[in-house]
Image: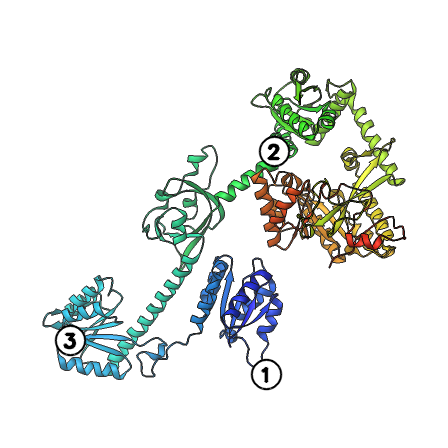
Amino acid sequence: MQHILLIETSATLRHVTEKLFTKHQYKVTACSTYIQALEKIIATDNNGKSPYQCIVLGWPDHTDHDADEIIALLSEPQYGHYNVIVLSHEADTSKLDWVSHRKQTALILWENHIECVNILTEMQTPKPEINANSGDLSDGGPPIKILFVDDSPTVRVNFRRLLNSNGYITDTASGVAEGYDKAIENTYDIAIIDYFMADGTGDSLCALLRDNPNTANITTAIITGTYHDKVIKDSLDAGASECMFKSEANELFLARIKSMSRMKHAMSSIEKERKRFECILSSVGDGVYGVNNDNLITFMNPAAKILLGYNIYDNLIGQSPSALFFIDPQEIYPTHEHTDLAHTIYGSAEELTAEEKTFKRIDDELITVECTAFPLIVDNVSEGSVIAFRDVTERKLLEDELKWQAYHDPLTKLGNRLYFEEELRSEIARLKNTDQQSALLYLDLDRFKYINDTAGHSAGDKLLIEIGNQLSGLLTKDDLLARIGGDEFAIILKNTSKNQACSTANLYRNVLENYYFNHNGKAYVVNGSIGIAPLNHKTKSHDEALSNADLACFLAKGKGRNNIHLFVKDNDAQATMDRDLGWSVRIKEALANDEFILYFQPIVSLASIDTNTINTKHNYLINFDSTSPNITIKCNEVLLRMSDSNGNLISPDAFLPTAERFNLMSDIDRWVIRKSVETLVKLKAHDQDNRLSINLSAQTLKDKHLVSFIKELANTNGIDPRLFLFEVTESSAIENLEDANRLINELRKLGCQFALDDFGKGFSSFSHLKYLPVDFIKIDGIFVQGILENPIDRAIVNSVVQIAHSVGKKTIAEYVENIEIIKVLKKMRVDFVQGHYISKPKDKPAQDKSVADKNNDASGCQYPIFQKKA
């Protein structure tokens, strides 16, 4: 039984491949790691031999040092006896290069993995042995078949015997006509032709064989009894490679034949290699074509033709890509600067990587392609270029939609805070070099909370949409409107004076004052307070401008609402300081007196939720007052709250901006960590462990002493650091990439895990996964909330899940608000969920049902907890 060593890190792919070979009576040893496989390849049995006849290697998707060791090892001569099958998701240059330079090696795409058995059978089929006397055995090729043409029977017999006795397979013909007919009907490697024959000269037969595509590959030689310059010249002009003489010694004749045989074998090897590369090229899913220095197509694989709408049998060789499918970027975007693909690479040594271009299919449909081009250099001379491309039209549409989502409010379709802040930065930068003035309006609805609470959230959403439409109606072509918060809008008025800004602000206020919101037969009055912040070359930053406008809005509300207020630095600076100082004092007092409050929201395993047994009458999944459903709780996220003088909870949105401005975030984060440890200690006293998820701010990422602080806390209190899952937002991690990487790596060494929070807000989110060694991806709730109605949100969530899983990370969906969202997330194979439908934040951690049963005793545990799952 043939023994196969299977190397594949993916459990699913490994199982499928092992099952395939086992079904065909192969013995399979499967390795899940490259280091394990490396040891098995090097190891031998008691007889000093390897037990494996074939190695099936799953090519790594990412750089892996152990995989590189295997690839290098298999390239060495002592391991050249192995048959090797490479399985890969795509056929790129590095794989094709390695496979083409190693004997007994084949590359198969995963989508065609069922071909593995056929390929292996072909590789292991013994090749027929060549007789020791066969022609040109020294070159290791098959026997050479020779056609000897001469009108003398004696000459034909003598030379046939000579050639046959030296291992050549010889056939004869008596003249030009018979020789040509035999060459058409049979296959020959070499034709040796007498020059002077009754029905014509040998050079005429050479020309006939040369000009017929079916016989053009036959190497021809003239043999004559007379030396004559014209004979030799005519023969060589007709395509003969040699002129031999009947009078020369047999040894010299055979040496010439052997020389032609070696050349024939070399040409045959080159042709086989060409066909092999052509076969590989045809199996590649990307379009690939070549051009010469005149920008004319020299080859094109079937995938390229299909992507461009052509039939795979269409001959495009010799035509110009510019005439067939290239689109001049100036035709689409005439005002932009562009890189001309043709002029960049053709005839030059310049490479082009992942360049987006627009191609035109034969049906005139425009497609977006991603091109990679490499110069074709032969003997240090440019012979043109090779271009690979793939259709990324759908991906581009998704990226454009993702970019739109990242910069727009999904409810009102206006720009969001991220978009507005970028535009505000740009406007402030523009004003730095001019004497012009602009203004920032900060608008806060006065009665939104009342309407939202009394008429419901759907009414509140409808109101925000209508307000957005009302405000948009007053915009000029240069103004910019965005929704930057719950009921907060902001407007940039370009090239306007303070007086004009105040007049415009009053126009917006009047529109709201005269607007009535109708819902379910009731009319609601909606007013707004507007703060105005002048912008000019003295404006330091967008943060300063927003802060000034926010304060001006605060002061406008203080006048009795439905007012406007123009920020004047000298007059309003004290008010700014008083407000921030007031919050900063409260924050410091809360830190000193332990007046912050911790709340907990569970993150549960989606696989443990049985949607068929859930009581849909309830608007929550976990009941804190009784036994919870039989679900697995991954951990509880720790949430921070503050209490006012009346005992009402204050959202962190109210005080964290001030904490950031006064650099108090690290102190707050340390307070949360310390109190979380205290909670874990109380839980441990009841013989239970509970994992907590703690948010870290951007300021804390820079805290070089945080790791030692956590380590000391854990050691002192006997808490396992593996009970901590830390969350960092995508934006703060990317802005502090070096600090984030340092902190994540150091804490992971202790056993802590990390989650990347609010994933998807940034346009380049997917690329961030390469740089941040996190364990979990928390999908931003804005996409989860719209997953039922919005196909783009569904596509984005699905893409995040697939990409996260492909790089070995788990996913957590936030803002799960109902059972229908859970059902969709289950189909997408999301790992964990969190949201108000699971449980609203509570003042104690949630627990598994099994742990609740265990804790349901007389111990009076104040902090119910859950068991860790294996």
Task: Say few, some or many: other residues with alpha carbon within 10 Å of mark 1 (under 14 / 14 to 19 / 20 or more).
Answer: few
Q: Give the foreground label among 3 and 1.
A: 1
Foreground of the two, 518 or 96? 518
The amino acid type, in three-letter code, at marker 2 is His
Q: Which is nearer the N-term, disc 2 or disc 1?
A: 1
Give the number of the disc on residue 46: 1
Q: Is residue 385 visible?
A: no
Q: Looking at the picture, how far across and down is residue 757, in whole percent? A: 69, 45
Per the image, label 3 sits on a secondary structure element best described as loop
Q: Mark 2 points at which residue?
A: 408
Q: Is residue 263 left or right of residue 177?
A: right
Q: Can residue 379 be seen in this snapshot? A: yes
Q: How is the image coloured?
A: rainbow
Q: What residue type is labelled 3?
A: Asp
Task: Report which quarter residue 839 is drawn in.
Answer: top right
Marks 2 & 1, CB-CB < 8 Å contact: no
The amino acid on which the numbered mark 1 sits, given as a three-letter code, is Asn
* Circle on res. 150: 3
Q: In this view, does 506 lie above or below 245?
A: above
Residue 812, horizontal then vertical, whole percent: 67, 48
Of residue 595 and residue 382, the one placed in the foreground of this image is 595
Would you call the spot at circle 3 few (<14 residues within 10 Å), some (14-19), or many (20 or more)?
many
Q: Residue 95 appears at what percent x and percent y? A: 49, 61
Task: Tell me how far mark 3 sits from mark 1, CA to CA.
Answer: 62 Å
Give SS at disc 1: loop
